Image: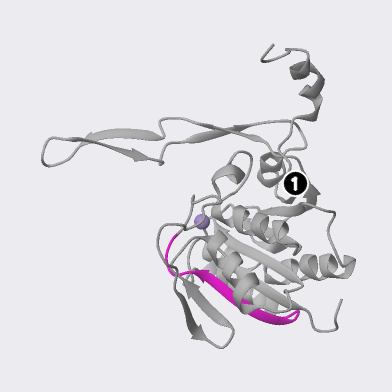
């Protein structure tokens, strides 16, 4: 690790999000910071790449750019166009809202960290599960400590990145940091059907209440109990326990 590491910050809530501002402050306390973030809200865009129109990279300030695309577009442009050599670390977030359990499959915040991992740069995704802006602001020092100790490790295991969720309380009030597994999210009434002024049906996804379930060591249990949750995620979705079972089905014979 070089004495002054280079860190890339991105997010899915857009360049103006307070969570990105705090993450940028955290990164600036550690090394040289580049910010490449979407020019608008891109939550729940998952790992989407923009393929069917041109992308614009706009310089907003020194080492600070916006992209009219997804978080994944941002990481790709940053690593393939702007930063040579590659940065030492990619930080994605701090997302406004949790990214636990199945959320990681929809999250643009998590996808940006995943894209960095695919491109060979260690990364973390950070999300704040609360809503109080002052609580969010209180996490700067702790995140600095976590990112610094990850940088000291020099790398993460192959194809692995960390998904961090901060509890809905101020940092001085947390019980500690727990390493967790993904829990399960159960949505209720998250698809609403209604009628537009012309009498046509329309649908609106989201807004319903959601519950959580999952084992004792899962992310949401840690966060609910007041811990910072750190979940190691990897890119390989293979269900290895099922390989021999599915082979025994002799599909196609
Ligand atoms: Mn978001």
- The answer to which image quadrant residue 4 occupies is bottom right
The residue segment tinted magenta is: 29-41
Q: In the picture provided, is 238 more to the left or to the right than 60?
A: right
Magenta stretch holds residue 33 = yes
Q: Position of residue 239 (x, y in %)?
A: 75, 30
Q: Residue at x 53, y 69 (%)?
A: 37
Tell me the quadrant of the picture where the C terminus can be found.
top right
Q: Residue at x 75, y 46 (%)?
A: 234
- The answer to which image quadrant residue 9 occupies is bottom right
Q: Position of residue 114 (x, y in %)?
A: 67, 54
Q: Is residue 22 above or below residue 125?
A: below
Q: Nearer the viewer, residue 128 or 155?
A: 155
Mark 1 C-beta closer than 8 Å to ligand 1: no
In this view of the protein, can residue 51 be seen by the observer?
yes
Q: How many residues crowd mark 1 within 10 Å: few (<14), some (14–19), many (20+)?
A: some
Q: Nearer the viewer, residue 61 or 24?
A: 61
The residue wearing badge 1 is 234
């Amino acid at each position: 690790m070089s004495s002054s590491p280079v860190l890339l910050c991105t997010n899915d809530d857009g360049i103006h999000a307070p969570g990105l501002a705090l993450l940028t402050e955290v990164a600036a306390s550690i090394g040289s910071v580049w910010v490449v973030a979407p020019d608008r809200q891109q939550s729940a865009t998952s790992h989407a790449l923009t393929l069917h129109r041109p992308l614009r990279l706009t310089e907003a300030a020194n080492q600070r750019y916006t992209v009219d695309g997804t978080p994944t577009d941002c990481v790709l442009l940053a690593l393939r166009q702007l930063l040579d050599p590659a940065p030492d670390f990619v930080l994605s977030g701090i997302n406004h809202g949790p990214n636990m359990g199945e959320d990681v499959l929809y999250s643009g915040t998590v996808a940006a960290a995943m894209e960095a991992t695919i491109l060979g740069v260690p990364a973390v995704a950070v999300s704040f599960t609360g809503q109080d802006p002052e609580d969010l602001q209180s996490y700067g020092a702790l995140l600095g400590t976590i990112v610094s100790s990850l940088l000291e490790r020099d790398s993460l295991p192959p194809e692995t990145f960390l998904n961090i969720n901060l509890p809905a309380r101020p940092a001085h009030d947390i019980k500690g940091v727990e390493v967790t597994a993904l829990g399960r999210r159960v949505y209720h009434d998250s698809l609403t059907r209604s009628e537009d002024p012309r009498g046509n049906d329309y649908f609106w996804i989201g807004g319903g209440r959601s519950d959580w379930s999952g084992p004792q060591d899962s992310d949401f249990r840690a966060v609910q109990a007041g811990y910072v949750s750190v979940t190691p995620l990897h890119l390989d979705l293979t269900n290895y326990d099922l390989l021999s079972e599915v082979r025994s089905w002799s599909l196609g014979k």
